[in-house]
Image (tube, rainbow, N blue to C red):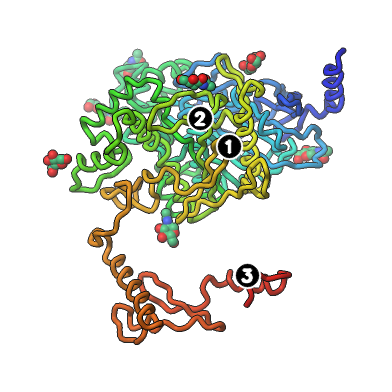
C-alpha cells in the first residue's frame, strides 16, 4: 500500500461508523464520507425526505410533513429529481421532495455547531435539481459551514393553479418553505447551528429566496439571505398576463381536446389527478400558451397560502422578513444572445421597426401617453448615437437589464429602507465561468457564471473538480467569492475583518444615496451606482404610473435647467436654500430679519453648545434641537468614558 493509501485509511479510521448514521425525528439516516478535492473529509446525507411524496391526492397540493421510517434509511445517494418541462433525466419522478445535508462535523457529539447555508437551485421554475454532481458543496465546505441543498416541484407539479382555492398554486414555493422548516428543526443533529441559517439561491432560486422573504410564516427560521441574479420582481418569476386557469385548461386539453373553457376547477382537478404523472410531464412540453406555470398571487386567502399581496407592494411597505441581504447580478446576464448573432440582429430589427417592443410587459404606461414615444425613449437610452459595430452589444445590454438586472437592483433599492443590503456585480472573466462570448458594446459575464465559482460540477462537457486545470486568477476569484459568501453566512457581513485575500477592503452598505457595491473582477473594487446611467434608483421613467415597476432614468444625464418639470415644492426648496445661503454671504446671517415669507418668517438660532439648535430643511423649514439624537449623544459619552485619546473633543 502506498503512502496515500495509508493516509486515506487513517482518515476513515478516525470517523467511527456510528458517526455515519444520524438520528432525526423521522428515523435513522445512513450517510457516507466524502472528500473535497483538497482532501477535507465531510459527511454527506443525500436523498433525505423533507415532506411526504406529493403523489395521488397530494398532487398540486401543499406539502405534508414527512413520514417516519423503521430501521436505517440509506442516505448515500441523491434522491429522485422532480419532473422538469425542459429536461428529461433518468431519475425524474413526481416523488422528489428530497434534500441533501453536507457537514464538515465528523462526529455526533454535538460539541460544535456551525452556521448553515440552505441553497435553492435555479432553472426558471421549469427545470433544475440539487444532485451532488451539479451542486457539490466541496468549495464552500472548506470554510466550515453546513450545507443543505434541495429539490422542489417544478412546472405544472409545482406551479399549476386554477386561480381559486381548488388548486391555489405555488406548491413549489411551499415545498421550499417546508425544507427551510425541516432544516431549522433538524440541522442540530448534523452539527448545524439553527440560529445561524442563511438561505441562498441563484436565478429562479434567487427569485425563490425573494419569495421566501415575503412569506411571513418563515419568520425566525433564518437570519440572512443571498440572492444571485433573480428577484420576485423579475418578469419571468410570476404569471404575467396569463390567466393561470387558462394554462391549466390548455394542459388538460393535451389529453382531451373537447374540454370546455367553462369547466369547473373541481372537474379540472379530478381529471388531472386521475392522469399518470409521467404523461403530465410529457404534456407540459406541448402546451400552446406562451408561459410556463409560475408563482401566482393566491386568492382567496387560506391558512396555507404562500403569498396573497403583490411582491412589489410587500417590498415597498417593508412587509417582508428583514434579514441582512447579499444580492447582485453578473455583468451581462444575456451575453449568451451573442451566440446567435443572426437571431439577435433580427430581434434588433423587430424592436427598431416597432419601438413599443422595448416597453417591458410589466410596465404600466400612464393613460394618454404616446406609447410609441415611450418605446422610443427606451430605445434611445440604449441605442442613440451608438456606433454601428456596437449596436448588437447594446441590444444585449437592453435585454440583460430588462430580463434580469433592473429587477435585482430594484429589489435591493426597495430593501435598503428596512434592512442591511450588500450589493455585488460579478465581472470576472475566466474559463471557470465556462462562457466565452464577446460582443462589442456589451459586458462579458453571463447568467450563471458565478455559480461555477461556488459549486463543484462534474458533467460531460464541463467539470471544475480539478482546479489545477484553470488559471490561477480563476482560482483566486473562487477563493474570494467563497470567503465573502461564507463570511456573510457566519458574520452577516462579507468583510467582517480586513483580509489580504480580499485586498483589505471593507464592503460598504448599498445605501440609497450612494448605491455602493462590490465589483468582483480581476481585482475587487468598491464602486458606485451599478449600471448607471441605465438604472438610477432615485428616478422614474417619465411616463410610468406612480411607483409601480419603476425602472430607470430616461436620458443619460440629469438636468435641472427646466424647473417647470419638477414639483413646485422642489422649486420652493431651491429658492429657500439659495436665499439662506446668499443671506449668509451678504449679512453673515442666513435669516437677518424675521420678515421673509419665503423663509416662513423664521429666525435661525445659533448652534450653541447646550441647545444644538439647527434648521431642518424639509417640506417646511423647522427649527429643531440636537441633530441625530440619541446617536450623537451616545457617541459623545462613548468618547468621554472610553476613548484614551478622543479625536473629537467636546
Ligand atoms: C445530539 O443532538 C441530537 C439532536 O439535537 C440528539 O438526538 C442527540 O442525542 C445528541 N447527541 C449527544 C451525544 O448528545
Ligand atoms: C457524478 O460524476 C461521477 C464522475 O463522472 C460519476 O462517476 C457519477 O456516477 C456521477 N453521479 C451521478 C449521480 O450522476
Ligand atoms: C373529453 O371531455 C369532454 C368534455 O368534458 C367529455 O364529454 C368527454 O367524455 C371527454 N372524452 C374522453 C375520452 O374522456
Ligand atoms: C358551459 O357552457 C355550455 C355551453 O355554453 C353550457 O351548456 C354548460 O352548462 C356550461 N357549463 C358550466 C359548468 O357552466
Ligand atoms: C405618437 O408618436 C408618433 C411619433 O413617434 C406619431 O407618429 C404618432 O402620430 C403619435 N400618436 C399619437 C396618437 O399622437
Ligand atoms: C425610503 O425611506 C425614505 C425616507 O423615509 C422615503 O422617502 C422613501 O420613499 C422610502 N423608499 C421606499 C422605496 O419606500
Ligand atoms: C475565448 O475565445 C477566444 C476567441 O474567440 C479565444 O482566443 C480564447 O482562447 C477563448 N478562451 C477560452 C478560455 O476558451
User: Is residue 464 left or right of 38 when viewed as pictured?
Assistant: left
How far separated are the C-alphas under marks 3 and 1?
44 Å
Q: Secondary structure at mark 2?
A: loop
Pinpoint residue 84: horizontal percent, then vertical percent: 48, 22
User: Is residue 644 left or right of 8 when viewed as pictured?
Assistant: left
Q: Secondary structure at mark 1?
A: helix
Q: Which quadrant of the figure has residue 155?
A: top left
Question: Which residue bears the numbered disc 1?
Answer: 178
Picture residue at 63% right of the left edge, 28% below the top: 472
Question: Which residue bears the numbered disc 3?
Answer: 635
User: In front of the other: label 2 or label 1?
Assistant: 2
Q: Is residue 44 above or below residue 633?
A: above
Ligand 7 is within 8 Å of the C-beta of the residue at disc 2:
no
Ligand 6 is within 8 Å of the C-beta of the residue at disc 3:
no
* Of callouts 2 and 3, the N-terminal one: 2
Residue 448: which disc?
2
Amino acid at each position: 500500500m502506498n503512502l496515500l493509501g495509508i493516509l486515506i485509511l487513517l482518515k476513515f479510521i478516525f470517523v467511527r461508523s456510528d458517526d455515519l448514521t444520524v438520528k432525526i425525528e423521522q428515523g435513522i439516516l445512513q450517510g457516507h464520507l466524502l472528500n473535497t478535492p483538497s482532501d477535507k473529509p465531510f459527511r454527506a446525507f443525500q436523498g433525505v425526505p423533507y415532506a411526504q411524496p406529493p403523489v395521488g391526492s397530494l398532487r398540486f397540493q401543499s406539502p405534508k410533513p414527512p413520514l417516519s421510517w423503521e430501521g436505517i434509511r440509506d442516505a448515500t445517494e441523491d434522491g429522485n429529481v422532480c419532473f422538469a418541462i425542459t429536461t428529461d433525466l433518468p431519475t425524474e419522478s413526481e416523488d422528489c421532495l428530497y434534500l441533501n445535508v453536507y457537514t464538515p462535523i465528523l462526529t455526533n457529539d454535538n460539541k460544535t455547531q456551525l452556521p448553515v447555508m440552505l441553497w435553492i437551485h435555479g432553472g426558471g421554475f421549469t427545470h433544475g435539481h440539487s444532485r451532488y454532481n451539479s451542486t457539490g458543496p466541496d468549495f464552500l465546505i472548506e470554510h466550515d459551514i453546513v450545507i443543505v441543498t434541495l429539490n422542489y416541484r417544478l412546472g405544472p407539479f409545482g406551479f399549476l393553479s386554477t386561480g381559486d382555492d381548488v388548486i391555489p398554486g405555488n406548491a413549489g414555493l411551499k415545498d421550499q418553505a417546508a425544507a427551510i422548516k425541516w432544516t431549522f428543526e433538524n440541522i442540530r443533529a448534523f452539527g448545524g447551528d439553527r440560529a445561524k441559517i442563511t438561505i441562498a439561491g441563484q436565478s429562479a432560486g434567487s427569485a425563490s429566496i425573494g419569495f421566501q422573504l415575503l412569506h411571513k410564516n418563515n419568520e425566525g427560521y433564518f437570519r440572512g439571505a443571498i440572492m444571485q441574479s433573480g428577484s420576485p420582481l423579475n418578469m419571468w418569476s410570476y404569471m404575467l398576463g396569463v390567466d393561470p386557469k387558462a394554462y391549466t385548461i390548455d394542459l388538460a386539453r393535451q389529453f382531451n381536446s373537447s374540454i370546455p373553457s367553462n369547466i369547473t376547477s373541481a372537474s379540472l382537478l379530478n381529471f388531472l389527478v386521475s392522469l399518470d404523472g409521467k404523461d403530465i410531464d410529457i404534456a407540459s412540453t406541448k402546451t400552446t400558451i406562451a408561459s410556463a406555470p409560475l408563482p401566482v398571487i393566491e386568492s382567496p386567502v387560506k391558512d396555507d397560502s404562500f403569498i396573497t399581496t403583490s411582491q412589489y407592494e410587500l417590498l415597498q411597505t417593508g412587509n417582508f422578513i428583514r434579514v441582512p441581504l447579499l444580492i447582485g447580478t453578473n455583468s451581462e446576464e444575456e451575453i449568451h444572445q451573442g451566440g446567435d448573432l443572426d437571431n439577435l440582429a433580427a430581434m434588433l430589427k423587430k424592436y427598431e421597426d416597432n419601438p413599443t417592443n422595448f416597453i417591458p410587459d410589466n410596465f404600466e404606461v400612464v393613460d394618454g401617453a404616446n406609447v410609441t414615444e415611450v418605446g422610443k425613449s427606451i430605445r434611445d437610452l440604449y441605442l442613440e448615437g451608438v456606433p454601428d459595430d456596437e449596436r448588437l452589444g447594446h441590444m444585449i445590454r437592453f435585454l440583460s437589464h430588462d430580463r434580469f438586472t433592473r429587477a435585482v437592483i430594484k429589489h435591493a433599492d426597495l430593501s435598503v429602507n428596512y434592512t442591511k443590503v450588500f450589493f455585488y456585480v460579478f465581472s470576472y472573466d475566466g474559463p471557470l465561468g465556462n462562457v466565452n462570448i464577446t460582443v462589442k458594446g456589451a459586458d462579458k459575464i453571463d447568467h450563471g457564471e458565478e455559480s461555477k465559482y461556488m459549486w463543484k460540477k462534474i458533467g460531460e462537457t464541463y467539470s471544475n473538480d480539478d482546479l489545477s486545470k484553470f488559471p490561477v486568477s480563476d482560482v483566486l476569484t473562487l477563493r474570494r467569492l467563497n470567503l465573502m459568501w461564507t463570511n456573510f453566512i457566519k458574520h452577516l457581513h462579507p468583510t467582517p475583518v480586513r483580509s489580504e485575500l480580499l485586498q483589505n477592503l471593507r464592503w460598504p452598505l448599498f445605501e440609497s444615496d450612494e448605491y455602493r457595491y462590490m465589483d468582483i473582477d480581476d481585482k475587487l473594487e468598491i464602486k458606485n451606482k451599478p449600471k448607471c446611467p441605465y438604472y438610477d434608483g432615485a428616478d422614474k421613467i417619465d411616463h410610468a404610473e406612480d411607483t409601480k415597476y419603476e425602472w430607470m432614468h430616461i436620458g443619460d444625464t440629469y438636468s435641472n435647467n427646466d424647473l417647470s418639470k419638477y414639483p413646485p415644492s422642489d422649486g420652493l426648496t431651491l429658492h429657500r436654500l439659495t436665499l439662506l445661503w446668499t443671506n449668509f454671504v451678504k449679512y453673515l446671517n442666513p435669516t437677518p430679519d424675521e420678515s421673509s415669507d419665503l423663509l416662513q418668517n423664521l429666525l435661525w438660532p445659533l448652534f450653541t453648545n447646550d441647545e444644538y439648535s439647527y434648521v431642518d430643511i424639509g417640506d417646511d423649514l423647522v427649527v429643531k434641537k440636537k441633530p441625530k439624537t440619541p446617536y450623537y449623544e451616545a457617541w459623545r459619552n462613548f468618547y468621554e468614558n472610553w476613548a484614551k485619546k478622543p479625536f473629537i473633543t467636546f
